Amino acid sequence: MELHVQKNNHEESPEPLILEPTTIASLQTLVKKGEWVAGISLGEDLESYLVWALKRLIDKPKFFSGSLALKFAYAQETVCDKKYLQEVGDTSLLLTGLFPERSHHLGVDASFFSVIGRTAFDNASQCCRRYGQKDLATWYQEARDGFIPMADVLLAAHKEPPVTPLHALELWKETGSIFSRNLFKQKVLNGDNFLATGTIQRQ
């Protein structure tokens, strides 16, 4: 199964991911494929969560609507809105793994979405602890700690990950992404243009 991504003219609001057929089974297969390519084992809990996040992306056409930075700022100012913080975390996760080129289009660091996402999950965890919800707090912390591996799995699920060698290098150095490290080395060995943006160009 391949990823088919449609984009509109607004770089901040990518069109939803289209998967055929759009079933839970196909999403599970997608995640398993990403794990195999990336050499990562997420474990049952994170696998299930990633499938659920992808299902939300398919079911909710406006998933990426609005500014993520503004959403995060609002979530910071709102007293422990765990649902909103989780939405920010999920959006950041999918952008990091499925649409990594968005950071280039927005003129921000390659780690921009991952920093926001992990911080959102961490804040949600702290909110839960503050109100004695220890189990939920532990889960949000697991989501924070598993953010980069989950994003790596999504990135690896692409037939051709949409990142340049420079972007892969930045993701590796700024987030510790093992898959981005391996991808960077592979692209350099293949002779990809280090500074090329958009479609990878061969020298």
Image (cartoon, rainbow, N blue to C red):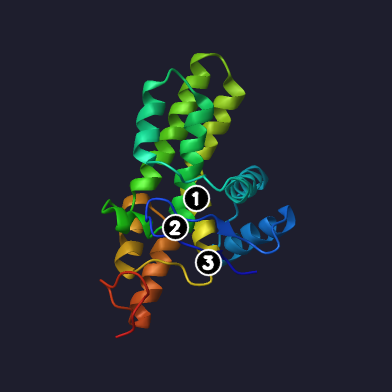
Q: Secondary structure at mark 3?
A: loop
User: Residue under circle 1?
Assistant: 94
Nearer-the-camera pick, 76 or 192: 76
The residues bearing labels 2 and 3 have C-alpha atoms spaced at a distance of 10 Å
User: Residue under circle 3?
Assistant: 158
- Relative to residue 135, is residue 10 drawn left or right? left
At label 2, which amino acid type do we have?
Phe
User: Residue under circle 2?
Assistant: 99
Give neighbour class at mark 1: few <14, some 14-19, many 20+ (Cα, 10 Å): many
Image spot of residue 199 (x, y percent):
37, 74
Above or below, 49 against 132 in this view is below
Give neighbour class at mark 3: few <14, some 14-19, many 20+ (Cα, 10 Å): some
Q: Residue furthest top?
A: 131
Q: Are marks 1 and 3 in contact (CB under 8 Å)?
A: no
- Relative to residue 131, is residue 20 drawn left or right? right
Which residue is painted at 26% across and 54% down in the image? 107
Q: Quadrant of the C terminus?
A: bottom left
Image spot of residue 93 (x, y percent):
48, 47
The residues bearing labels 1 and 3 have C-alpha atoms spaced at a distance of 13 Å
Q: Are marks 1 and 2 in contact (CB under 8 Å)?
A: yes
Give neighbour class at mark 2: few <14, some 14-19, many 20+ (Cα, 10 Å): some
Q: Are marks 2 and 3 in contact (CB under 8 Å)?
A: no
